[in-house]
Image: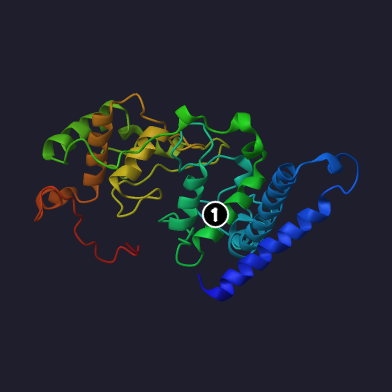
Amino acid sequence: MNSRFRNAALAARNGLLAGALLLLPLSGSGQDESVEEIVEILRAEVDRLTSRAELDHGRKIYLRACAPCHGVQGDGKGPAAIDFDPAPRNFRRGAYKFRTTVSGALPLDKDIERTVREGVPGTEMPRWKNVLSEHDIRVVVQYIKTFYPYFDDPDSLPLEEDIIEIPEERPFEPSLSSIAAGRKLFIDQDCVKCHGEGGKGDGPQADELVDDWEVPILPANLTLPYYKNGKRGQDIYRVFTSALNGTPMPAFDELAEEERWQLVDYVQSLEIEQDLKYWLFQENPNQVRHPPIENSGVEE
């Protein structure tokens, strides 16, 4: 670490220690405390002061970077969010679509951090990873969580069994057979009712869908070169497993892992269905590649 920054960090830590020392009792029960007990009190107080300082730092970042769209009160009604479609997330509702937790559960910190870091393609939500440091992303997420009080309720937080493990390794490689099996699942699971026969979001029930607050919502167009939650196979697998809270999109966690990967293969094929052999077998048959998309308007 650069010596200037190291000295600044030490000064900040010593400042917190000094503040904590001032809070220690000088009479009464404090006289009977051992050095070890005093150290524990100091550590707890430093942790509290550090947490408060970081939360304040997160608030400043939020007001500068997030409030113009999400609003000072976190209600999604910022002054810049005029005619946004979809509207900015209302953090006060506590409904997060992009999670690695089961349907209906709150997200993990890393889930919200991922959305801040990567943005939401196809919407006005930008990726902040090239603007904010990892520390800034972490503390602004902690501030965002203050808009929904149940994040402070231990009984409302996801249990260990509520956390979904997204496999990094597939159990099999994509193939024409897995795509065909995925298409059958797409039909059998009634995905066509909302997403349509060709996955363009034009199914017979597409115009009837509303979110949990009775606001009309359109199903995703699966033929686009981007998805809001990411286009990797693991991103799509995550949606099939966790659902999208606040929307009609259900979880397909009753499907076997193999079936969910088959569904992933079919959905990914929709973007370039006119050239499946290119997608499946270009150069290296074990590595799925997408052909370049001209004038997509979306940064890869």
Q: Position of residue 248 (x, y in %)?
A: 45, 34
Q: Residue at x 30, y 48 (%)?
A: 232
Residue that carries the numbered disc 1 in the rendered image: 138
Please, is residue 265 above or below residue 52 in the view? Answer: above
Where the C terminus falls, by quadrant?
bottom left
The reply, left or right, for residue 24 in relation to residue 237 is: right
Q: Nearer the viewer, residue 102 or 243?
A: 102
Residue at the far bottom: name it.
4
Q: Is residue 288 visible?
A: yes
**Front-lying residue, 21 or 33:** 33
Residue 290: quarter of image? bottom left
Residue at image x 18%, y 50%? 288
Q: Residue 34 at x, y = what percent?
A: 76, 42
**Residue type, label 1:** Arg
Residue 278, x across and y down, in percent: 12, 53
Which residue is situated farthest in the right direction here? 28
Would you call the spot at circle 1 few (<14 residues within 10 Å), some (14-19), or many (20 or more)? Answer: many
Image-based side of 81 in relation to 231, left or right? right
Task: Pinpoint residue 210: horizontal percent, then vertical percent.
Answer: 50, 37
Q: How many marks?
A: 1
Image position of 208 (left or right of 204): right
